[in-house]
Image (cartoon, rainbow, N blue to C red):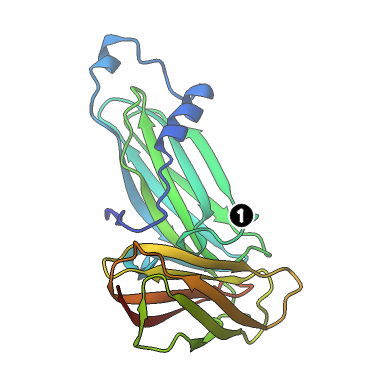
Amino acid sequence: MIDRVSMDNRIARPRISFGFWVIALASGLLVSGCDKDRDDDLTPPEIHFVKTVPEITSAEICEAPSDLVLRIAAGGAVELTVRFTDDTELGSAKFDLHNNFDCHGHKNTIWNVIEIIDLSGTEQTVTKTFQSPDDVRPGLYHLGVQVLDAAGQEAPERFFDLLVVDSADTVPPVISLHSPSEGGTYSKGETLTIEGLLTDETSLATGGYEIQLIEPGGIELSVARVDFPDDFGDTAEISHTYNIPGFVQTGLCSLRIEAFDWRNNTAIYYRTFELTD
């Protein structure tokens, strides 16, 4: 039996509780809480993961470990069995599947699922199957589960990191950075020249790359973002200039380049330099 609390400290963790409550109320899925018993019900319901197909595994997701990871092939399916419990009376549950490409959201996808169902009694087990389209865009998705009881109390959101892979292309792009040099020294206000080459064994079409400047304290600043069109090839030049702002903290800084191809295979490259006044 599976009943582990998921980590919730990674970036791009959208909360859906407020929208869930509004939709459930508007749909008439929650029973009115006007009577005394429900006004006194302050105990939230609970979510228990009973079984998953495929089985749960662990992986590094968004640069942090996750122990609630499901992996499927493009065109495959996820089967999720969940037990909902409440001390008084259950109200409704929501299943929400959406993309979390690169932890920020690269492109739209045709695979998005939102389903709200009625619940009853103090315990109910539900099995749901989520079938991915054959032409689904591979990458990282979230599969979230929420529940409200009849009094409107909400359980903490539970979710899986769902990785969709395409066996036809699992190799990420290759990033070759020519400038700036590793370990160089630059001053505030100086122009940073960023040049390099991005290559892929199949195609970069609908892919792209993002460049960030990371201060010594970990603050990330956006430098450039490029999205490739549908008819792009397998090679791209990286060429940008960036005037280093005066507010950037001095010390050891990093350039972070994240590139992804048409199948959302992702490569990350770092180049460090010293920043002075």
Q: In this view, does 250 lie above or below 195?
A: above
Q: Viewed as shown, does residue 171 lie left or right of 125?
A: right
Query: Measuring 33% from the left and 26% from the top, which residue is drawn there?
Result: 89
Which quadrant holds residue 250? bottom left
Please say whether residue 138 is visible from this viewpoint: no
Please say whether residue 9 is visible from this viewpoint: yes
Where's residue 128, x and y in %?
A: 50, 48
User: Which SS class for mark 1?
Assistant: loop
Where's residue 251, x and y in %?
A: 26, 75
Where's residue 88, x and y in %?
A: 28, 25
Query: Measuring 32% from the left and 47% from the top, which residue is drawn there?
Result: 48
In this figure, which residue is indicated by the disc labeled 1?
A: 111
Q: In this view, does 36 lie above or below 94?
A: above
Q: Quadrant of the C terminus?
A: bottom left
Query: Could you say which is closer to the camera, residue 253 or residue 53?
Result: 253
Query: Could you say which is closer to the camera, residue 195 or residue 193?
Result: 193
Residue with the most extreme top position: 35
